[in-house]
Each structure stands twice: as structure tokens, then as C-alpha cells.
């Protein structure tokens, strides 16, 4: 994964199950698009959004963040730059290791048969990027899917961040407040030890002030989601930040 | 971790709770020593073995493999080259992520107070090495400690190996048959996709033939344990392998 973090501070997460804004030209101001969602996402809906975004912005980095392996297809793999796979620190066993090993066991078996046809397992899976993930809104759909029953304390977020930086070595650590704004304490704590890891924050960012605060606290990038679908003006505000304030 | 795998094919795992052989000079034939054990290991017993091995073989690479964070001390950290921490693919949640994050949260908190005294968290933890681990003898003490109820099929071992190589990126993958010899099928399967990951096998290796078979199947190194304590002749056999047979 070779994201230039110096020029990637604003990401937009699109939920394929929700209507797109009338003019997706507002994506011109974002640095990267994530096709995400956490409920009822289908391969068809995903491919549809991928095509629209690619059609309007052929050079915009495009990432899929599936929550189930059924959402990953050869078509998606060919269309997106990366497939990020959350490894949920405060989720259940399946969402830290179980699903991932099952997916790769299956992939290994499927591809065994193809190896004679010049398809390399490594080619197919090289787009997979693990993301150390913390879900802090225990009432969210994301928490329910990942088996999250407790949010992490600030000290635990710092511990999970340290574990990511020096132990698990995931390239990205993501603090997700899933639908609500969580302030900057977790971002400040997680940023303490980061040298190699990029730090993302999402949840409730709907103004230039919140965007600026989180970036100033140490996030490499903010992920803006709900207001892209629901409030074009608020979304546009989050993209218009003066670098001098960060 | 900078092990030269080309010259490291034989490792000896010493259990500090068991008596050492009369002459530990037999370690001259091994390439690396792991201070391990899985029951009743204390910090004192560990330090004792570390001193004896360091006294006789000052240049032999020395690794601690603790199964509980209470076994890790500043003294140990200073004395050993690495502290390998198993991440057990078929263990319970605690043994894949829970214990590790708790340990690093604690370490982060403890060291906060020391940061003003020129102690860097990164200095202390830089010796920690994660090892993707599979425990295949479900009746062993190791399985009981790590919450392993099921061994993995050959396809699942291959999946866990692929997950290690391209997703979790642990530098080492270890198949442990914990007290019994498990043959070579898992080693062959795990070796399929390895380019960056080193592959270790342990369990019941007590002859030159078994050692040769496992290395020929693709293991970078074998880990010999029981017979070091129990059968010096068998141990010595495992160290005398003709490279031409591998």
C-alpha cells in the first residue's frame, strides 16, 4: 500500500445502500474514496458505485472495505486500488482472526486449481490491506456485526495502537465512532507512538471545525461518511480546511 | 529480527522447570536456543537458564518464549536477543489478541511515567517478535493454556500460513505438535506460499531421520525440545544431519 499521506487527509466513505448526492462532483475535494457500509451491502450495489466514481474521477484512489468475504469478487479486486480488511481489536474472535483465516483458506483452496493457469495467489491477494480497527459506538450496526460489546478506554486505545505499530504491524489504525462524534482524546492517545502506522478517525465529522480538530490531534486523515449522503453543504465544509489550522 | 535462516536450521527449546543435561556442551551443535516451557515457569528459573547458556555460549542467539506476560522482566529483556510472542491461530481470543493488547496497554502506562527519564517505549519493546502459531496436539498443556480445542486441517494450516505471509506479516510461522511427532504434511502445506515468512516445526523430533524429513518438507528450522532434557544421544542425532539429504 503506497498512499502518500502528506496529500491524503480527507477520505469519503460511501455506503452503496444509500442514495448518492445529486452531483457526485463534490468528490473533487476528497483525496480518497472508500466503498464501505455495514448493512445490506451487495456486490451489485458495490460495483455500481465503483463504476460511477471511476467514471467521474478515474484517478481518485478507490478502496473497498467489505465486512463480509462474500462482498469480495474478482471484479471488485480488478476495479479498486486496495481492499482494506478491518481487524477489530475490540471485536469477537471471528473479527480479529477467524474470518480472515477462513477467507484465506478458501482462497488458497480455490486457487490451487488455477495455479497451473498462471494465476498467482499472491497477485490476487496483494491488494488486501489489514487495518487495526477500534469501534467505539457500541450501539452501532458496525459494533453489532463485529461482536463489539465494550468500547476501549483511552489507555486501551493507546495499547491497541502500540500493538499495531510494533507488533501486528498493520499499516493503518482506524478509530471509528460509527455515527457519533467522539472528540479528539482517542486520536491524541493513538498518535503517541505512531511512526510507521497511519491513523484514521471516523464518526460524526460534519464541519470544518471537527475536521480540523481531529487532524490537529494527530490523525493522518479523517473519514467522512454520513454527511456525504445526507448534507452536501456540511460535507463540503469538511473538505475546506486551512492547513495553517492543523 | 535479523536471523540468518541459511545458517539456522536447528533450534533447541529449553524448559526451565526441567533439569538440564549433565553437560550443556551439547548445545554447541545447535544454532539458537529458545527458553520456553508451558507450565510453572518462573522468572527466577528463566534467568538461571539464561545465565548458564550465556556463560557457556556467549554468542549463541538466545530467545525467550514466554506464555504469560509476568515472565517478561527488564532483566530478561536485557539478556535475550528476542522475546517471541506466540499469536495462536487456533487458540482463544486472548491468545491471538487479548493478552497482547493488555500487555502493551500496561507497558504503555508504566512507561508513560518514565518517558522523562530517557526511556523509550520503542527501545523496550523492539525485542518483541510476533510468531503466528498453530498448536496441533489438543491434549497438550500448551493447548490447554492457549484455549485450543481443535487442531487445524492441512487446508487450514495452509490458510493460516497464507494469512501470516500476506496479511498479518508475522516474520515467523510455527507449527507445534507439542510432544508428539506430526509428520510432514503441515510443513509441506505451510511452506507453499512462504517468501518472507520463516517456517518452524516442533514436536517429537528425536532422530536424524525426523529432523531431515521435516527440513526436506520445507521447514526453515526444527525446534527440538523434550529429548534435550531426556535423551542426550537422541538430541545429538538431531543435530547431525547431512545437508545433502535436505
Image: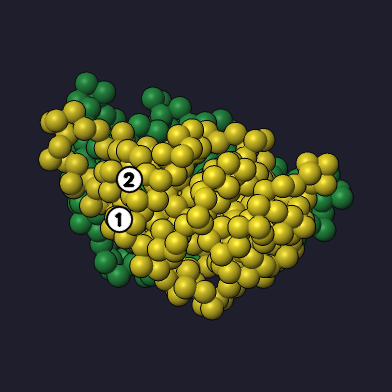
Chain colours: A green, B yellow
Where disc 1 sits, the SS reads helix
Residue at the disc numbered 1:
B43
Which chain letter goes with mark 2? B
Residue at (34% x, 57% y) in the render: B45
Quarter assignment of residue A7: top left
Circles 1 and 2: CB atoms closer than 8 Å: yes
In this orientation, which residue lies closer to the viewer: A85 or B9?
B9
In this orientation, which residue lies closer to the viewer: B197 or A21?
B197
Residue B114 showing in the rendered view: yes
Looking at this view, name the residue that lies furthest to the front: B22
Query: Where is B21 relative to A25, above or below?
Result: below
Residue at (41% x, 39% y) in the render: B55
Where disc 2 sits, the SS reads helix
Residue at (58% x, 41% y) in the render: B28
Query: Where is B4 relative to A243, above or below?
Result: below
Residue at (18% x, 28% y) in the render: B118
Residue A143 point in image, percent of width and height? 35, 65
Q: In this view, does B108 lie to the left or right of B190?
A: left
Q: Label for residue B236?
A: none
In this orientation, which residue lies closer to the viewer: B141 or B30?
B30
Residue A200 point in image, percent of width and height? 35, 42
In this orientation, which residue lies closer to the viewer: B239 or A15?
B239
Residue A16 showing in the rendered view: no
* Quarter of the image with the C terminus of chain A in it: top left
Quarter assignment of residue B68: bottom left
Residue at the disc numbered 2:
B76
Quarter assignment of residue B40: bottom left
Sequence-first tag of 1 and 2:
1
Amino acid at each position: 500500500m503506497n498512499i502518500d499521506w502528506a496529500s491524503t487527509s480527507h477520505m469519503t466513505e460511501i455506503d452503496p445502500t444509500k442514495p448518492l448526492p445529486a452531483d457526485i462532483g463534490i468528490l473533487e475535494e476528497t483525496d480518497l474514496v472508500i466503498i464501505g457500509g455495514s448493512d445490506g451491502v451487495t456486490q451489485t450495489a458495490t460495483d455500481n458505485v465503483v463504476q460511477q466514481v471511476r467514471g467521474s474521477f478515474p484517478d481518485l484512489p478507490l478502496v473497498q472495505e467489505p465486512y463480509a468475504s462474500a462482498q469480495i469478487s474478482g471484479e471488485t479486486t480488478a476495479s479498486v486500488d486496495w481492499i482494506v480488511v478491518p481487524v477489530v481489536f475490540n471485536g469477537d474472535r471471528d473479527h480479529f482472526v477467524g474470518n480472515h483465516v477462513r477467507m484465506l483458506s478458501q482462497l488458497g483452496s480455490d486457487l490451487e486449481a488455477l495455479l497451473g493457469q498462471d494465476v498467482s495467489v499472491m497477485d490476487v491477494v496483494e491488494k488486501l490491506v489489514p487495518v487495526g480497527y477500534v469501534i467505539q459506538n457500541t450501539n452501532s450496526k458496525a459494533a453489532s456485526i463485529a461482536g463489539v460489546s465494550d468500547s476501549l478506554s483511552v489507555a486501551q486505545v493507546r495499547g491497541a495502537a502500540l500493538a499495531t505499530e510494533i507488533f501486528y504491524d498493520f499499516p493503518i489504525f482506524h478509530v471509528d465512532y460509527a455515527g457519533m462524534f467522539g472528540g479528539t482524546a482517542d486520536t491524541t492517545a493513538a498518535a503517541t507512538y505512531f511512526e510507521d502506522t497511519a491513523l484514521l478517525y471516523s464518526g460524526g465529522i460534519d464541519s470544518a471545525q471537527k475536521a480540523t480538530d481531529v487532524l490537529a490531534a494527530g490523525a493522518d486523515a479523517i473519514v467522512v461518511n454520513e454527511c456525504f449522503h445526507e448534507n452536501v453543504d456540511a460535507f463540503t465544509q469538511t473538505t475546506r480546511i486551512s492547513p495553517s489550522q492543523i
